[in-house]
Image (cartoon, helix red, strand yellow):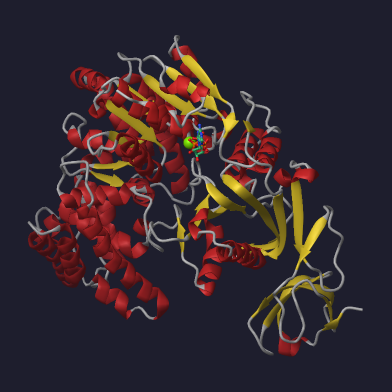
Amino acid sequence: MDISHIFNELNDAQREAVAAQPGPLLILAGAGSGKTRVLTSRIAYLVEAHQVSPLSILAVTFTNKASREMRGRVEQLLGIPMGGMWIGTFHSLAHRLLRQHHEDAGLPPGFQILDSDDQLRMIKRSLKELDLDESYWPPKQVQWFINGHKEEGRRPQHVPQSNDPQQQTLLAVYSHYESLCQRFGLIDFSELLLRAFELLKNNEVLRARYQDRFQHVLVDEFQDTNSIQYAWLKLLVQRSKNLFAVGDDDQSIYGWRGAKVENILLFEKDFPDTKTVRLEQNYRSTTSILNAANAVIENNQTRLGKNLWTAGEEGEPVKLYTAYNEQDEARFVIDQIQAWVNQGGARSETAILYRSNAQSRTFEERLINVGMPYRVYGGLRFFERAEIKDALAYLRLCESPDNDPSFERVVNTPTRGIGNKTVDQVREFARQNQLSMWQSANQMLSGAGVGGIQLTNRAASALAVFVKLINTIKEQIREQDLYQQIEIMLDLSKLIEHFEKEKGEKGQARVENLKELVTAARGYELEETEDDLPPLTSFLAHASLEAGEGQAEEWEDCVQLMSLHTAKGLEFPLVFLTGLEEGLFPHQRSLEDGSGRLEEERRLCYVGMTRAMQQLWLSYAEVRRLYGSEKYTSPSRFLSEIPDELIQAIRPKPKTVYETPSRKSTWVDDQSTHESGISVGMAVTHPKFGDGMVINIEGHGEYARIQINFSELGSKWLVLAYANLSPAA
Ligand code: ATP
Ligand code: MG
């Protein structure tokens, strides 16, 4: 069989990896060296040259987006659809396995996934039931404790005994939480992985079956697997030993979530005949970009070390923009994108990257203002919006009424006269009798064994309306198409009606989102789904797993916004890495926690920089308003790690006086000027507050608001008409 089309696009080292003999293989290589390309080529090679059935291949990637791309790439190489192939994220594959063997995994057929919000709700309920005060036992901390143990494969009984009362209490909450989830068939994200692992570990027959079935297991971004994921992979390849792992220790960015970069070192120990291949040529970036990124990552002490070079052109130097504030940063970045588009570039070739999801808002506002389509990946996910979660909660209750987080979410949304007190009573009755809230509500209404807890007549009739509503929806959606099921639910629950009453744009947006859910369902039905589940079950799981859609459509030409974590593995011709300020990036927490975390931040910076193919812009704001407060910033240490000759500084042209910047700068014209001639960067004097510099202007005319940074008093917002400003002497 002619397989030259696979090999033609590879260099020697890549070919060696793709055509390696079966057995454990580890590809350790830097950013943009073709690791992902090698992995997809390997799949094509196995199928074409070795007649391996696509059904006996399992490939794991990091995001849903990456797994879609991988499937597409393999299909393109092979020219056939690969529907049956197991390609996905760890979570989606674990989910698939558990659905097929829910009974062996000890789960009810309609088990449901708790997202992180729902998990918190369950944790709060556990705390309440154990009479623990949330202010002493912050639910987030408990969540971190539980997930941390699960990621290491530890059930409560596996956690080492401790004399520390605090540890003992946390453990008690873990146990209680676990029993609640088990009782109601709910599993959180870490549980997905742990259950899937235990399923294979404890069930010899299934284990043998899957070990036989998956002759080849391939994993991308191996540096970010956690203990339980690695253990699961090892179980799968115990017989075949055909584990093909690609990764880069310099891009390990999920240590905070339990990922173990040490797995790379363990690999060679666990599989003694491992063949290790290194790829050293970068095909993605210009020399300038690669050199700057290499200069940053060199500051990390703990590295396996590697050489990365490119035959690409030198390209433009990396550029650094110093913004007055976050508004100015957004304005500048979007002006640059506009210029790129004016020169014939596509919007989708550009990416705005940031450390914290909250930073996206300023960019989004500016993009909306100038009418430029964009898409935010990760972060504010469609399926995480409140109104969408309300709608999904109705559907989940219809599927499996014992889903307490869903029950609590919609029992009084839209309001139907069920107060907190009633909900507390239902919860208390549930706790006393080990029931789900749904069961509890039904029993209380039927008056069976209610004991000391008595609903008022009003409360009882309101609750009865809710129970009847869920039963009616359940009945009416039976045998309907998925999108009709959603329409019926939206109609009967009166959710749309409810949000239509909410005034202003927000309510409007919520209604639109709900309608969008119907569209999403239609699209979902048309897509080829990989499982044989009822569409609603499958759709609800998809909603939990998918980093959702929204904004512009994926196929539309739009600017790409995402956090640095989400950008992993992707590439864009024009990249803006924004918010390079101490405390923001590197993140404050990493500065407080010691050097390990700081090195992870630096790797994150390296990941961000190496996404750029042709041009890389770095930026920071001297004043930033974020999370509702305003701060003076200092530039990120990562900026000072890039040698001066590799970076070109660009600043807005100062209007009068301005401190001399440390780097050699190019000046650009600034557009934030008010009709009166006052502009951002201008030095002014106020009769009372003294000298200061204009750092922000909002609005026009005499009622424009002007923010001034006064040398003595710090920053203040003033209305131009009353401010009585004069140019500084
Ligand atoms: P990351 O570490 O960011 O995940 P990676 O090592 O997975 O990067 P790829 O995304 O596979 O790298 O490849 C980077 C770019 O280089 C892609 O555009 C890819 O198509 C291209 N590329 C890889 N190998 C070659 C090659 N031999 N010839 C030409 N282009 C290549
Ligand atoms: Mg990759």
Q: Is residue 649 above or below residue 625?
A: above
Q: Is residue 551 above or below residue 700?
A: above
Which residue is at a point 74% across and 73% down the rendered structure image? 680
Q: Quadrant of residue 143?
A: top left
Q: Quadrant of residue 554?
A: bottom left
Which residue is the extreme one toward the right? 729
Work out whether residue 491 or residue 447 is closer to the camera in this orientation and state it. Answer: 491
Work out whether residue 125 or residue 708 is closer to the camera in this orientation and state it. Answer: 708
Work out whether residue 719 or residue 517 is closer to the camera in this orientation and state it. Answer: 517
User: In the figure, is residue 53 to the left or right of 15?
Assistant: left
| Total numbered labels placed on residues in the image | 0
Q: Is residue 420 visible?
A: yes
Position in image of residue 725 (x %, y %): 81, 84
User: In the figure, is residue 337 to the left or right of 197?
Assistant: right
Which residue is at a point 63% across and 50% down the rendered structure image? 615
Q: Quadrant of the N terminus?
A: top left
Q: Quadrant of the C terminus?
A: bottom right
Position in image of residue 511 (x %, y %): 31, 72
Which residue is at a point 71% across and 48% down the rendered structure image? 317
Position in image of residue 29 (x %, y %): 55, 27
Work out whether residue 662 or residue 555 is closer to the camera in this orientation and state it. Answer: 555
Q: Is residue 229 visible?
A: no
Which residue is at a point 28% across and 37% down the rendered structure image? 79
Q: Is residue 207 above or below residue 121?
A: above
Position in image of residue 370 (x %, y %): 54, 73
Q: Quadrant of residue 236?
A: top left
